[in-house]
Structures are given as structure tokens and as C-alpha cells.
Amino acid sequence: MIVSGGASGLGLAAGMKFAQNGYDIVIVDIDAAKGTQAESEIRKLGVNALFCQCDISNKAQVEEAGRLVREKFGRADVLINNAGLEIRGSILQCTEADWIRTYDINLKGIYYMSNAFVPLMAAGQGSVINTGSILGYRAVGERAAYSSSKGAIDTLTRSMAYDLAPNGIRVNCVAPGAIDTPLLRGSINDSPDPAATEQFLNSKSVLNRMGRPEEVANVMYFLASDEASFVTGATWFVDGGWSIL
């Protein structure tokens, strides 16, 4: 299983979940220190693990990661396009550089990763999972680039599912709500009123709490498994009910 953004948060939770079920794991991440640590943690579960330091918006780096995976494992079974970037700003506040960087990672990154790893999948045995966001469907303030890029992932997922179906490769999307990752926790703590921010995020779930990374990883694992053999082109909300509010 290959997971981008696999050194922490949702990506690491996914890596751990798949490793616990016998998958060898490839972590693709830009953070060398966290990636090396994640590789070590996963190996303790008794599977092979490989960390590839990589900026997924850099075609040459992604292609090199693909070469390493081909050389070490010979194939890919599951690809989780999880890495993403969130920059605050309305359409008037977002700089052109912020806009381009967001789309380079959140969308072009999926393009590069898919072109590097989907060809390593055997016909009828591959699964791709893209990480979207509830903010692709529900609006909050000052997330113009991020929200629009995540909304595009839904459409891209359906297009990929249609095009890759003749090869027996399924493509689905998870759309997390507020998940208590280190990244989100840092954002909460950096806000003007952390307590109010956390209360707001809790209120966006009918369960009145934020989700846990492993709760998203569990859905990713299901979508990649034979239990979801007739599921493709779908977006699964893992949002505690935010999407019904």
C-alpha cells in the first residue's frame, strides 16, 4: 500500500491500519524526520516499510518514488492519495502563489501519484482512494483555494473510476470532517480562541465531537478491501454527520 502524506495524521493512521492487516507500506511524505519515524513504527508491526521523501507536486521526485517501489516490491495493490495543503484565504485574500501551490499538491499531486503507481497495479486487483474533505461540500470562511480543490477531487474520483474500470481498478474518495489530527490540533491552538474553535468543530458533528484518525483509516481499509468489491466512484463522508447539517 502506498500512502502520500503518510508520515502523520490520517496518512499514518492508514499506514498502521493496513500494516496491522498484513500489507507492506510505502510512505510518501515531504517530512524526512516524521517519515523515518513512521517507517520505523510500521516495521515494528512485522511488515516491510519504505519511506520515500517526496514532494508530490514534483514530477521527478514522484517518478523516483515509483521506481523505488517497483524495484523493492514489484507491484502496487492500493494507492491512497492523502497528502494535502490547506491555506487560509478568501478569493480576494489568497495570493496567486498560494493558489498555485494548493492546486499543485491537492490535485496535480494526485495526477503524478496515479501515473506513477496505478500502472503497477495488476488488472482486477487495484484500489485507489483519494482524500477529499467535507469542505468540498460545506462552506466555511476563507478557504477558497482549499475548498475548491477538495471539491474537484470528488469529480476527479468519478472520472478516474470510470476510466480505470476496464482494468478492474476501483477508485473511491473519503471526505473527512473535523478529525483530531496533530495538524488540526495545531490550528486550534493557534486560533485567537482555542476553546471556542474546538467547540465550533465539535458542533459540526451530530455526535458532538471531532473524529479520530483511525476512524477515517477504517473506512479507507474497507474501501480497499474485497468487502467493497462493488463500490467505485463513490465519496464516503467520514464526518460525524456534518454533511447532514
Image (cartoon, rainbow, N blue to C red):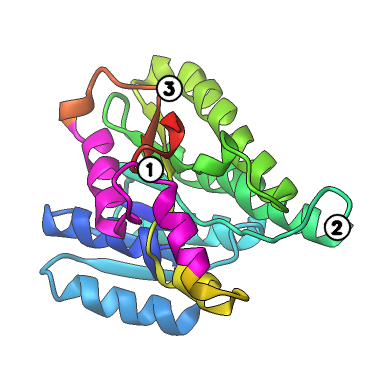
Judged from this view, the residue extending furthest toward the bottom is 33
Image vertical order of residue 153 relative to residue 110, above or below: above
Q: Nearer the viewer, residue 31 or 242?
A: 242
The kind of secondary structure element at disc 3 is loop
Residue type at mark 1 is Asp
Residue 93, which numbered label? 2
Q: Is residue 215 left or right of residue 26?
A: left
**51 is higher (above) or lower (below) than 86:** below
Q: Residue 41: x and y, percent?
A: 23, 76
Label 3 vs 1, first from the N-terminus: 3
Q: Are marks 3 and 1 in contact (CB under 8 Å)?
A: no
The span picked out in magenta is 196-225
Residue 10, percent from left and from top:
37, 58
Which callout, 3 or 1, points to the residue nearer the camera? 1
Identify the mark nearer the N-term, 3 or 2.
2
Horizontal and vertical percent position of residue 18: 21, 53
Residue 92 in magenta?
no
Label 1 secondary element: loop
Between the residue at mark 3 and the residue at mark 2, the CA separation in whole angstroms equals 34 Å
Q: Position of residue 96 (x, y in %)?
A: 88, 56
First in sequence: mark 2 vs mark 1: 2
Q: Amino acid at mark 3?
A: Gly
The residue beneath circle 3 is 233
Which residue lies at the image location 83% right of the left edge and 57% below the top edge? 94
